[in-house]
Image (spheres, grey):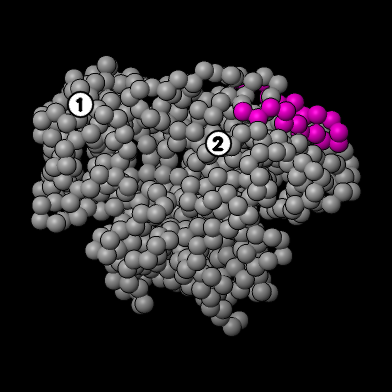
């Protein structure tokens, strides 16, 4: 058979054109180049490692590059470093599971687009046990992520043991999960566990903002007190004593959102803390926007961009997190970002783009069983899906698809449809035994019709399970790019027709309000008998029968009171989630008859609030919310049947 060569852009198309589609099309993330040579490997356990430099790779990415040669009598891995060998083994492991052990022969040549591919996890607001952290690190390694940004202190707790200042772990210093923190021994264990999997830990001591726990523990009224400068330097030294510069090269110092009078510091403090990091042989990192940390000699820190409109200067390096706060999105909407977002939307030299970092912020209280954080924030789907935008090369950003998927019949639609199919295959074959919730189902087979309150059809064949009638995006004004209806308030009618091959009862994810994990829960909790906490009168009908809303675990209205110490905290944020979001509860039961069924959602939108989207989710699912799958035997149409 003649060999087939393709790049990551044309990979899937080439395989579909091939007489016999190969399992290589299902690799996640997609490799740079594949040559399919025909036949199968008869001894997949015979793996030989050869140190060799992969051609055509940027110098700083060479250690992670590899060539995987799969022949009939065994496998050869070519790489110049153990990092490349590790990723080659991960790719081979995927191929074994995807093929059921009968791996086709071929050559995979691959390397990442970015040196660092990260996940930031906030353990300051809500403590996560070490066992759960290990699960996260395992999944990161399986999908070639290599940076764990550990946000370990915040307003609610200083969660890293300090032997120099033990009062930081005193009960009175905590606002949530009292006295739950990581001992220095546990911190070291997490570093070692990550290191074994090729992951570097970047800890964050968040100062001078988000420091109520710091101040309560040490009886500090104001961060501008003279002793604060030295205390933070001591804590930096203590942190750096736990690992070598090679093991822990970056120390993140926060520096953003010092919003209260108690958190303001003299201009010299942040540069002094950055200098202390450098004194320990590490590289300081700070959020941007945030307080500057330029040293007296003009030395600059690494920027971590978290808000659009900010970019590094010509001589600065940066991590990028813009648009990658996955807890700010609807569960099904992470498909849009994973398939079409491009990190580093601004111009800067490639070598200074350190890499994208996805972020898990969860301002809201989880309660004592913080393991539910992995369910509430859909960690696993985000890690698996976002690995594409972190590893693969993307030349174009597609903001027009961040809320609305491409129209069926277009090349972009074919791309996202194949992408979500690849994720479903991983769910079912590669990580079927994953000990974490994997709340993901395919949605591009659905078809919705959207009408305004006057009966005018504004869109047909909308291929989504979550439909944004109008969406707020921080960096994009609500307009036709991400909205079907430009008006700020009104009524929308969403309709789809579903053909079932039998009479059946199915489960359906149905939801409306999406509570952003980053300070968004103040919008309000729904009352009994209502689907939404702000807009009243939402109605879901299947064949003319009303589908009632769930019995809420904590029904509204709930009085929301702003805490004077923290701009993002409120009384309602201190109430743990129960079943507010559709992926937090078991699917709603819905009856379908044999033939065509009419689903109609009447969706009023009464107020115009920042971050409050005009949105509806309705998608049939089988299985459980933690391990869902698609409902087979259904057909969808946006035309009346």
Which mark is first along the chain, 2 or 1? 1
Q: Secondary structure at mark 1?
A: loop
Give the residues in magenta. Answer: 534-553
**Quarter of the figure with residue 189:** top left
Q: Position of residue 270 (x, y in %)?
A: 18, 42
Q: In the image, is residue 147 above or below residue 228?
A: below
Q: In the image, is residue 400 above or below residue 569?
A: below
Query: What residue sits 50% from the left and 41% below the top?
Result: 328
Q: Residues within 10 Å of mark 2 (few under 14, many from 20)?
A: few
Q: In the image, is residue 579 above or below residue 418?
A: above
Query: What residue sits 84% from the left and 52% below the top?
Result: 639
Q: Depth check: give the residue in front, 463 or 243.
A: 463
Residue pointed to by mark 2: 609
Quick check: 550 left or right of 97?
A: right
Q: Position of residue 57 (x, y in %)?
A: 35, 73
**Quarter of the figure with residue 565:** top left
Q: Depth check: give the residue in front, 385 or 184.
A: 385
Residue pointed to by mark 1: 222
Q: Position of residue 166 (x, y in %)?
A: 17, 23
Quick check: 28 left or right of 564?
A: right
Query: What residue sits 31% from the left and 34% below the top?
Result: 259
Asked whether the residues under the numbered discs 1 and 2 touch, taking CB atoms below 8 Å apart as contact, a structural biologist would say no
Q: Residues within 10 Å of mark 1 (few under 14, many from 20)?
A: some
Comparing marks 1 and 2, which lies closer to the viewer?
A: 2
Label for residue 176?
Answer: none
- Residue 549 on the magenta span: yes
Quick check: 92 left or right of 177?
A: right
- Residue 491 on the magenta span: no
């Amino acid at each position: 058979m003649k060999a087939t060569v393709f790049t990551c852009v044309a990979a899937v198309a080439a395989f579909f054109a091939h007489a016999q589609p190969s399992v290589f099309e299902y690799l996640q993330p997609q490799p740079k180049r594949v040559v399919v040579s025909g036949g199968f490997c008869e001894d997949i356990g015979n793996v030989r490692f050869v140190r060799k430099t992969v051609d055509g790779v940027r110098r700083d990415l060479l250690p992670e590059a590899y060539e995987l040669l799969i022949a009939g009598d065994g496998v050869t891995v070519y790489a110049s470093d153990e990092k490349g060998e590790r990723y080659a083994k991960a790719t081979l492991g995927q191929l074994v599971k995807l093929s059921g052990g009968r791996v086709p022969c071929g050559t995979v040549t691959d390397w990442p687009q970015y040196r660092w591919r990260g996940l930031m996890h906030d353990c300051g607001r809500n403590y996560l046990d070490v066992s759960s952290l290990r699960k996260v690190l395992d999944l990161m390694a399986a999908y070639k992520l290599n940076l764990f940004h550990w946000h370990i202190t915040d307003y609610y707790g200083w969660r890293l043991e300090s032997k120099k200042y033990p009062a930081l772990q005193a009960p009175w210093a905590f606002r949530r999960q009292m006295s739950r923190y990581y001992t220095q021994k546990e911190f070291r264990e997490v570093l070692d566990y990550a290191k074994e999997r090729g992951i570097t830990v970047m800890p964050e001591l968040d100062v001078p903002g988000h420091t109520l726990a710091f101040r309560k523990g040490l009886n500090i009224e104001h961060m501008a007190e003279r002793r604060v400068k030295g205390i933070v330097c001591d804590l930096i030294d203590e942190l750096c004593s736990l690992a070598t510069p090679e093991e822990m090269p970056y120390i993140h110092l926060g520096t953003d959102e010092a919003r209260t009078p108690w958190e303001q510091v003299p201009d010299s403090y942040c540069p002094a803390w950055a200098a202390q990091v450098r004194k320990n042989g590490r590289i300081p990192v700070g959020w941007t926007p945030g307080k500057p940390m330029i040293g007296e000699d003009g030395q600059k820190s690494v920027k971590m961009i978290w808000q659009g409109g900010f970019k590094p200067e010509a001589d600065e390096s940066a991590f990028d997190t813009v648009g990658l706060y996955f807890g700010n999105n609807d569960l099904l909407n992470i498909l849009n970002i994973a398939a079409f977002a491009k990190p580093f939307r601004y111009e800067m030299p490639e070598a200074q783009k350190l890499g994208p970092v996805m972020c898990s912020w969860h301002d809201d209280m989880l309660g004592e069983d913080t393991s539910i954080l992995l369910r509430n924030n859909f960690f696993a789907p985000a890690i698996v899906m976002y690995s594409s935008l972190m590893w693969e090369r993307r030349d174009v950003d597609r903001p027009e698809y961040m809320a609305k998927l491409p129209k069926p019949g277009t090349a972009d639609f074919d791309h996202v449809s194949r992408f979500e199919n690849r994720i479903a295959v991983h769910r079912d074959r590669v990580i079927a035994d994953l000990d974490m919730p994997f709340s993901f189902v395919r949605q591009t087979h659905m078809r919705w019709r959207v009408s305004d309150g006057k009966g005018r059809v504004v869109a047909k064949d909308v291929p989504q399970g979550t439909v944004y009638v109008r969406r707020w995006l921080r960096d994009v004004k609500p307009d036709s790019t991400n909205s079907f209806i430009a008006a700020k308030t009104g009524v929308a009618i969403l309709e789809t027709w579903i053909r079932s091959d039998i009479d059946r009862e199915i489960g359906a994810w149905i939801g409306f309000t999406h509570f952003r994990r980053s300070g968004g829960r103040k919008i309000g909790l729904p009352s009994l008998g209502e689907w939404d906490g702000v807009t009243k009168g939402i109605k879901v009908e299947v064949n003319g029968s009303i589908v009632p809303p769930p019995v809420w675990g904590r029904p509204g209205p709930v009085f929301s009171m702003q805490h004077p110490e923290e701009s993002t905290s409120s009384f309602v944020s201190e109430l743990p989630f129960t079943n507010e979001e559709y992926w937090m509860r078991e699917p709603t039961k819905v009856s379908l008859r044999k033939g065509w069924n009419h689903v109609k959602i009447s969706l009023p939108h009464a107020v115009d609030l920042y971050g409050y989207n005009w949105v509806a989710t309705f998608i049939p699912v089988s299985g459980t919310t933690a391990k869902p799958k698609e409902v087979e035997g259904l057909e969808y149409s946006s035309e009346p049947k």
